[in-house]
Image: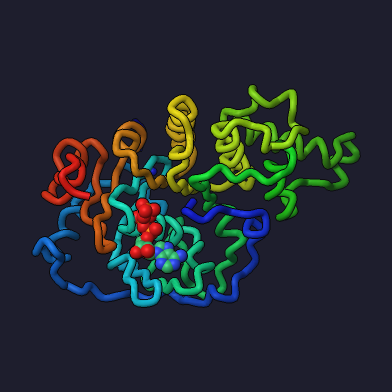
Amino acid sequence: MSEPSPTTETTESESTDTNDPTSTRTAATASMSGTSTTTGESEEELREEWTDYQFAGETHVAAENLDVHYGDDHALKDISIDIPSESVTALIGPSGCGKSTFLRCINRMNDRIRAAEVDGSVEVDGVEIYQDGVDLVELRKRVGMVFQQPNPFPKSIRDNVSYGPRKHGDIRTGLIDRLLGRGESDAELELVERALKRAALYDEVSDRLGDNALGLSGGQQQRLCIARALATDPDVLLMDEPASALDPIATSKIEDLITDLSEEYTVVIVTHNMQQAARISDQTAVFLTGGHLVEYDDTDKIFENPESQRVEDYISGRFG
Ligand SMILES: Nc1ncnc2c1ncn2[C@@H]1O[C@H](COP(=O)(O)OP(=O)(O)OP(=O)(O)O)[C@@H](O)[C@H]1O
């Protein structure tokens, strides 16, 4: 192993992110509460466990003292975590413990949920993304997201992939291209091919790029969604249970792809499938009920010798 989309789906209109008027929260550092958890371990003790983690690589995404509320529901409590670049980080834990909420903090998708209030800090490449003036379109180009249900647009395969770059004006259409006899369509085709190859889909669709994407199998649609995310040249890929709607063969292809992508991208994946987390991730963060990050470490350590009894119970199926 190398070193790291919600239950809501992205729609075409969502993908055209503009600065969201609800996104005015600023970074605020929450103090550590020091309260006791249901198991009697203090939050400092829990924190102790996962801050022992030795980084395999450079930190790419860092959350500090992150709290999320949905109205009265305190969904994430004082989360601090450093996620290394070019690796796969799995987020595991029982339903409702805040995994998707955390994932959505990394590209500020929670800004779209009116009830969501985010406090604390998230840095991507050392830049605070919860400061005023952050360009959310740019952020979401750099931090791509793939959701549980494949959600291609009802357009051609080619248009699905080129949608983002076209929207953001990233496909070059300048004079030099025209002088060289290259038109907009050449640049676009190049980009589409590159993204489809990177998503391990090109060979299966190269002869039908004009066909409607909805005619692809579920696994192909999911790889198309990954290609669509890659087309805007992100460096972080957030994946919310990307294989849970797929059959075992399609799942295996997605897992191989994720491993491959982690050589180039920082992948953060939510999964309910612990075997999947063990197979594909380099480090694993275990969230448990109450919105706590209980332990974070190398995946082998989490699965073979976790520090926390609660994590051991969860992993062995005695809890959660
Ligand atoms: N859009 C929302 N509006 C209000 N509350 C929400 C919203 N999304 C999540 N929550 C609440 O936040 C808490 C954490 O939910 P979240 O979906 O992040 O957990 P999860 O670990 O990803 O769950 P699952 O594994 O079931 O997807 C839950 O109590 C949930 O009800």
* Residue at x 31%, y 57% (from the top left corner): 81
Number of labels in the image equals 0
Residue at the location (24% across, 46% down)?
A: 297
| Residue 227 visible within the image | yes
Figure quarter occupied by ligand 1: bottom left
Asked if one can make out residue 122 in the rendered structure from this viewpoint, the answer is no
x and y, in percent, of residue 28 in the image = 38, 76
Where is the N terminus found, in terms of image quarters? top left
The correct choice, above or below, for 277 with respect to 116 in the image is: above
Front-most of residues 44 and 163: 163
| Nearest to the observer: residue 270 or residue 284 | 270
Residue drawn at x 21%, y 55% is: 294
Q: Does residue 248 lie above or below 222 as drawn? A: above
Q: Nearer the viewer, residue 95 or 242?
A: 95
The image quarter in which residue 73 lies: bottom left
Name the residue located 34 percent from the left edge and 69 percent from the top edge.
67
Quarter of the figure with residue 105: bottom left
Instruction: Tell me: 148 left or right of 12.
Output: left
Residue 103, x across and y down, in percent: 42, 55
Q: How is the image coloured?
A: rainbow
The spot of residue 109 in percent (x, y) is: 51, 62
- Position of residue 211 measured from the top left corner of the image (x, y, whole percent): 75, 33
